[in-house]
Image (tube, helix red, strand yellow):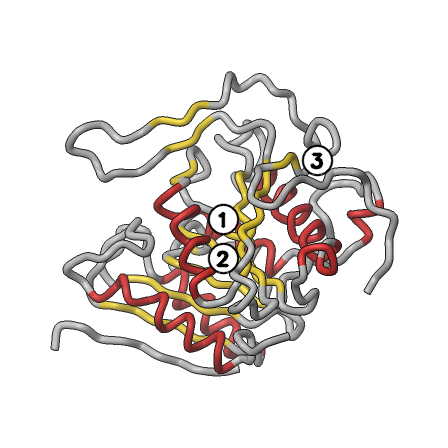
């Protein structure tokens, strides 16, 4: 067989909330005013469809006002589990449908609520690529947990999922939750931003010169992770492999799937490779971890 899988299987706070609520399904700002350290000098936000001959992807750029959008699971399927979805795009653009809306819609089919995060891009000069996006992700995780009762979700089943640069962001959110990347601004920021689990799909920028980058510091309290990557991905699968090894050595439950082919940037879309089957593997992993049972 041409396909080779590496499968390694594991393992309330009451606050006065600011008035930032919005109808379900509508994008809403995650910050009550300007985002932290935001100069708003990157130009007007743009949404660019693909040109003829390109992969069909909606590319969003120049995001200075980050938003979240809640995708509730059907009531008859709702497991209470919720995942914050982070599209990729090299921290320069967001592949908003391929690695965003399409993923939220899939999660709903398996009873998982989704929160689509439109985080700030492109990279801000003089700061790590993930710096502003991590602020947005941490804030979104706290908002999601604070709204557990309002949204009818489980406050202890909130995960984060990302692709490529979004996978890097999901990893950073899972690794750096103990210290916020910004100063607290209101009651929301007193709610935990720790994801209960993380799903990384072809994550980027976790290794350099064959080693994990210094920002990747795994501890015994790091949340469980699921990873999917392709052997022939130009964004090296060593990001997943070396992170899995660090999780294993620290005793953090993790599962990893590596397909021989698949390349990069496939999202959930079918291809000649079996790489697009990662959602079924992920669903099974979540089921085994008790994330797909009723609340």
Circles 2 and 1 in contact, beta carbons < 8 Å: yes
Residue 176: give x, y in percent of width and height: 65, 56
Q: Is residue 61 left or right of residue 139?
A: left
Give the residue displayed 65% in from the left and 42% down from the top: 135
**Which residue in the protein does label 3 denote?**
31
Query: Relative to 108, does residue 24 appear above or below in the rendering?
Result: above
Q: Earlier in the sequence, mark 2 or mark 3?
A: 3
Find residue 86 and name its label. 1
Helix, strand or loop under label 1: strand
Residue 167 or residue 271, whichever sits in front: 271
**Residue drawn at 55 percent across, 72 percent down:** 224
Q: Position of residue 82 (x, y in %)?
A: 58, 61
Left or right: 187 in relation to 87: right
Q: Is residue 185 above or below residue 209?
A: above
Q: Image quadrant of residue 96? A: top left
**Rendered view: 248 above or below 69:** below
Rate crowding at label 2 as few (under 14), some (14 to 19) or many (20 or more) other CA atoms within 10 Å. many
Residue occupying image coordinates x 33% and y 61% = 237
Which callout, 2 or 1, points at the residue further toward the start of the chain? 1
Q: Which residue is mark 2?
A: 161
């Amino acid at each position: 067989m041409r396909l080779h899988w590496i499968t390694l299987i594991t393992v309330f706070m009451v606050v006065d909330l600011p008035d930032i609520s919005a109808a379900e399904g509508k994008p809403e700002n995650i910050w009550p005013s300007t985002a932290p350290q935001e100069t708003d000098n990157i130009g007007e936000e743009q949404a660019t469809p693909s040109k003829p001959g390109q992969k069909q992807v909606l590319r969003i750029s120049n995001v200075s006002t980050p938003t979240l959008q809640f995708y509730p699971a059907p009531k008859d399927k709702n497991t209470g589990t919720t995942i914050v979805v982070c599209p990729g795009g090299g921290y320069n653009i967001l592949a908003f449908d391929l690695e965003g809306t399409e993923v939220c819609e899939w999660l709903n089919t398996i009873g998982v609520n989704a929160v689509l995060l439109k985080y700030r891009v492109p990279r801000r000069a003089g700061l790590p690529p993930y710096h502003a996006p991590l602020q947005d992700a941490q804030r979104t995780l706290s908002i999601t947990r604070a709204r557990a009762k309002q949204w009818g979700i489980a406050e202890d089943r909130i995960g984060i999922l990302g692709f490529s640069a979004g996978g890097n962001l999901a990893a950073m959110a899972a690794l750096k939750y103990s210290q916020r990347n910004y100063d607290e601004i209101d009651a929301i920021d007193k709610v935990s931003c720790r994801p209960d689990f993380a799903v990384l799909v072809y994550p980027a920028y976790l290794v350099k010169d064959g080693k994990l980058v210094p920002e990747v510091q795994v501890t015994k309290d790091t949340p469980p992770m699921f990873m999917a990557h392709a052997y022939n991905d130009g964004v090296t699968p060593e990001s997943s492999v070396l992170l899995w090894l660090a999780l294993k050595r620290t005793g953090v439950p993790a599962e990893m799937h590596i397909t021989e082919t698949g390349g990069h940037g496939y999202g959930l879309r079918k291809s000649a490779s079996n790489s697009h089957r990662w959602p079924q593997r992920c669903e099974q992993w979540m089921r085994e971890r008790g994330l797909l049972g009723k609340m």
